Image (spheres, grey):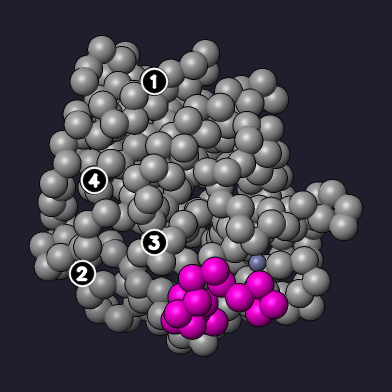
Amino acid sequence: MEIRKDYILDSYTIIAENRSKRPNEFKRNDDNGSIAKCDFCPGNEQMTLPGIGHLGSPWNMRWFPNKYPLADCNDRQSISINDKYFKSIYPYGFHEVIVETNDHSKQLFDFNIEELKVLLDVYCDRIRDLSSKEKIEYVLVLKNHGINAGTSLQHSHSQILALNHVPELITRELNAVNNYDNCPYCEIIEIEKNSPRYCYENEGFIALTPYAPRFNYELWILAKKHILSITQLNDSEKHQLAEILQKALIKLKSLDVSFNLLLINSPEGFIKNMPEGQKQGLHFRIMITPKTNIRAGLEESFDLYVDTTTPETAAEFYR
Ligand SMILES: [Zn+2]
Ligand SMILES: [Zn+2]
């Protein structure tokens, strides 16, 4: 396992041969997913690595280290390469899986608001716990739903990846917000509130489709007040977030597509102590990217995205 940098660009690839050994349910051609074989179902706990935590008795939600991690805490910095064109480091960190329910047939869009709120609580707990560990710079929270979103098991789960570096997407956004005197997202929320990309809002959050989405039906849920991470939300704010999230998920269910759900948080370190030269952190948002279009040559090769649904039409759908 190693993280290699492009010859000249700030873009990185994780080389992880171990991931090719992952079981792939979808290849079994068994739409119901065989419960007897499902590693994440109650009764099959010995199929996963020993648990780190759980809720309920025996459990409604449980989390444990990923068997096929994208990072681990074997310190192999000694094998890192720092040559002119060949740079690589060993991905140090923690990779966990949260099985969100003991019910094999239940997906995230079937969760009620209270259940979603509990999941958000667990996300916060994992971010705080892992961020407090030595060398960890960023904790990434990601959910893949459906075969086109990269999941290999259909039992509903999320992934937590704690890394000793800040991922490229977050670094790019942190650099971009630094070009503004005030948080651009706070201003964007005010403008988009009255645009055809507005979807809905509640007391604490607003849902909108971004002006230049990378994916058809891409949806953002932003905190209305300037907060830097989900870990800064209080109980009632998390409840409001769960409520607006559920609304979006129900619409996604009717779209019947694979999607990724990603939490965009500032690094926890920024909340305690903004690094020198950084004017502001990143405004917290949830980014949902449905996978309705197959990524073609342009997207894959030139990082240039083509959408066949306008964000204005998508917003109408979500409304
Ligand atoms: Zn299962
Ligand atoms: Zn802001």
Q: Give the amino acid type for the residue marked by disc 3 in the picture.
A: Ala
Is there any visible trace of residue 208 in the rendered image?
yes
Q: Distance between the Cα atoms at labels 1 and 4?
A: 18 Å
Residue at 26% across, 78% down: 84
Tag 1, which secondary structure?
A: strand
Is 98 drawn above or below residue 310 in the view shown?
below
- Cβ–Cβ under 8 Å for marks 2 and 4: no
Q: Distance between the Cα atoms at labels 3 and 4?
A: 14 Å
Q: Report which residue position mark 2 lands on.
A: 8
- Upstream in sequence: badge 2 or badge 4: 2
Near mark 2 (Cα within 10 A), the count class, few <14, some 14-19 or many ≥20, is few
Q: Quadrant of residue 219?
A: top left
Near mark 4 (Cα within 10 A), the count class, few <14, some 14-19 or many ≥20, is many
Q: Report which residue position mark 4 lands on.
A: 216
Is 316 drawn above or below residue 159 in the view shown?
above
Label 2 vs label 4, nearer the camera: 4
Magenta segment, which residues? 22-37
**Residue situated furthest right in the rendering:** 57
Near mark 3 (Cα within 10 A), the count class, few <14, some 14-19 or many ≥20, is some
Pinpoint residue 225: horizontal percent, then vertical percent.
48, 18
Q: Give the amino acid type for the residue marked by disc 1 in the picture.
A: Tyr
Q: Give the amino acid type for the residue marked by disc 2 in the picture.
A: Ile
Left/right of residue 128 with respect to residue 141 in the rendered view:
right
Q: Distance between the Cα atoms at labels 2 and 3?
A: 29 Å
Q: Report which residue position mark 3 lands on.
A: 149
Q: Report which residue position mark 1 lands on.
A: 200
Residue at 41% across, 80% down: 15
CB of residue at label 1: within 8 Å of ligand 2? Answer: no
